[in-house]
Image: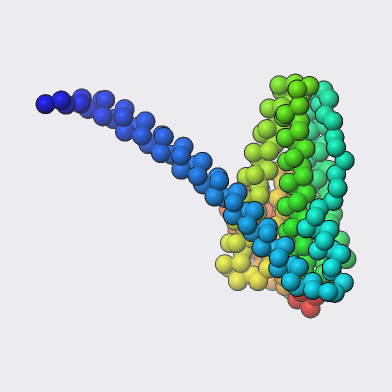
Amino acid sequence: MFTMKKPVIILVLIVLLVFTGYVNHSLTKQALLKASNDYQRHEEMELATKAGDGDDKDLVETISEGEAEEDVEVIDTKEEQVDGLLEETNSTIETTMSQEDSLRSKNYFIEQRLSRDKLRAGLVDRLNEIVNNANTNSEVKADAQKKIMRLGDISEKELMIEGLAKSKGFEEVLVFLTDENAKIIVLKNELTKQDTVKILDIVMGETDLDASSIKIMKKNLSVK
């Protein structure tokens, strides 16, 4: 009878575990991407339904179609230019989230979530252009690829934090993360110390940020 020695059996089991882990990781990534795309489509449909024929009609069209971006020819791109694209996008997202006009919108959370995700998608597209450009040197290409992966991780954490915050009793929450800080918008007329502690615990538990790097803002219920 054919028998396998113990070391061989252990080696086979290790190979199977590694292969299973890789397949599971790939399937999970695909599922997360599909869920993110489905969620974005759901947000767009919900915003369109709420807007109806009112003043938000133009905004719905703008968000759904996206702003036309100029074609960018990437030639001999430097790391500073890649960093500049990331900083520019982060600055735009943060500025838009904090504008008083935006905060007064009745559909603030849907609008800003869509805006955040679409600006990020545009950034990923431009980083992919850099990666796929024959004139991009290997170091810059590797840096752009790392940033694309990092943006995916950040988006997943934002969704996770928003979900955890809602499970703690907050009706609506919008999260914007970077490697250096976090901005959290909560649908509440007043934020108590207990509310702040809950949100800080969630964000610090899901990121490496400390309390001083986390800014929490409120959006009044009266302009929901």
Rendering quarter of residue 151? top right
Question: Residue 180: image x %, image y %?
Answer: 72, 44
Quarter of image, res 191: bottom right
Left or right, 14 with respect to 113, comes to left
Q: Residue at x 85, y 44 (%)?
A: 69
Camera-nearest residue between 206 and 114: 114
Farthest residue to the bottom: give it: 222
| Image position of 219 with respect to 183: above or below | below
Q: In this view, does 195 lie to the left or right of 109?
A: left
Q: Which residue is drawn at 68% across and 59% down?
A: 41
Whether 175 is drawn above or below 120: the answer is below
- 97 vs 206, nearest the viewer: 97
* In front of the other: 202 or 97: 97
**Residue 94 location in percent, x, y?**
80, 53
Inspect this view and state whether residue 204 appears.
no
From what the image shows, is residue 15 above or below residue 48?
above
Res. 136 in view: yes
Would you identify the image quadrant in which residue 174 lies?
bottom right
Toward the viewer: 66 or 192?
A: 66
Image location of residue 223, percent across then percent down: 80, 75
- The N terminus lies in quadrant: top left
Percent x, y of residue 143: 71, 30
Residue sitting at x 72%, y 32%:
144
